[in-house]
Amino acid sequence: MNALLARVWRLAKPLQWRFLWTVNAKFMCGITGVVRTEDGQVLLLRHRLWPTERPWGFPTGYAHKGERHEDTIAREVREETGLTVEVGRLLKVNSGFKLRIEVYYEATLVGGLEGLRLDPREVLEARLFAPDELPAGMPDGHKELLRLVSR
């Protein structure tokens, strides 16, 4: 039976991707950047659309179709703050809520806060914090990311 299924599968090559697309989950990629300065401070945003009890966190956004994840975090930081980052190593990949995968990168802020222009639709405030002086209202998962970059 398995040999027959394998043969049919190979013969149906033009339909394979359509079949796989139909039977597999479609998902979004949430990309987060742990953005630090050369002296170790971290860039945190007070997000307008996040829960009011935990609005502070790293720059985060969704990848566009076909976009490299490294490019997503650079774009999100630029769109939300007007700042430039250099994306570094991959920190973590996690299955997220429902049909979402979460990808976390390390990034370095280029040029400090010069040129800071917040997108008021998404961000209320952007500040640099020392890792041992984080604001209240930051998700535990984002605090854990700081421990990953400290290793």
Image: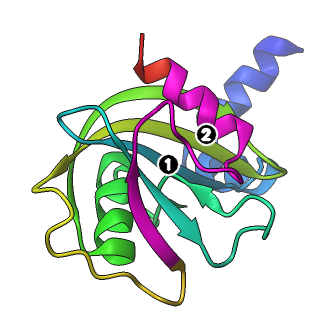
Q: Which residue is mark 1?
A: 32
The residue shown at (61%, 43%) is: 102
Q: Nearer the viewer, residue 40 or 23?
A: 40
User: Could you tell me residue 137's position as x and y percent?
Assistant: 71, 54
Task: Name the kind of residue labelled 1 in the image.
Answer: Thr
Asked whether residue 140 is drawn in magenta, I would say yes
Q: Secondary structure at mark 2?
A: helix
Whether residue 138 sits left or right of residue 35 in the image: it is right
Asked whether residue 11 is drawn in magenta, I would say no
The residue shown at (50%, 30%) is: 132
Q: Which residue is mark 2?
A: 142
Q: Which quadrant, please, contains the N terminus?
A: top right
31 w.r.t. 39: above or below: below
64 w.r.t. 131: above or below: below
Please state the extent of the stretch shown in magenta in the rendering: 124-147
35 w.r.t. 67: above or below: above
The residue shown at (81%, 62%) is: 53
